[in-house]
Amino acid sequence: MDVMIVDDSAAIRKILQRVLVQAEVPLGTVHEAGDGAEALEKLKTAKVGLILSDINMPTMDGIEFLSRCKADDALKFVPIVMVTTEGSQARVLQALELGAAGYVRKPFTAEQIKEKLTGII
């Protein structure tokens, strides 16, 4: 399965990729983007079965990115899991209301990611 990881931290993107392997997610191509705008651009040509996205990012945050994905016929059924340091319960609830498949708080473990993805993929 091809995956898109959206986070403004390159280190977090690499860590998430390693965690997906440790969680035994059947990975194909892993696409990366530094913010929602870059991710939307890449998703015009990349077909993915899962998106992991941060909430707090420059240019286009994860909430706006999620909202745009859910409004796009080509992307609206792709599960999006928010992976965030966001402490505000209101922002997390907003993401869930917009259609996020779930969320995981940073710092996370491979087991937490695996648990969250069970039933989604």
Image: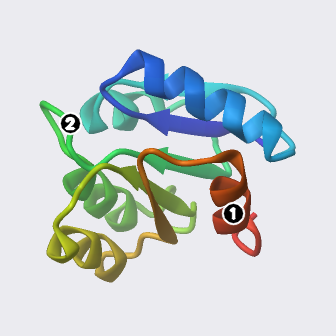
Cβ atoms at labels 2 and 1 below 8 Å apart: no
Closer to us: 16 or 44:
16
Residue at x 28%, y 31% (from the top left corner):
35
Query: Which residue corresponds to mark 1?
Result: 117
Compared across the picture, whether 49 is left or right of 40 comes to right
| 53 over 77 or under it: above or below | above
Q: Label 2 neighbourhood size at 10 Å, few (<14), some (14-19), many (20+)?
A: some
What is the quadrant of the C terminus in the image?
A: bottom right
- The percent coordinates of residue 67 (x first, y second) are 27, 63
Q: Which of the pair 100/115 is nearer the observer?
A: 115
Q: Is residue 8 above or below residue 101?
A: above
Lower position in the chain sequence, tag 2 or tag 1 = 2
The amino acid type found where label 2 is placed reads: Met
* Location of residue 86 by image quarter: bottom left
Q: In front: 50, or 93?
A: 93
| Relative side of 87 to 117, left or right | left
Quadrant of the image containing the N terminus: top right
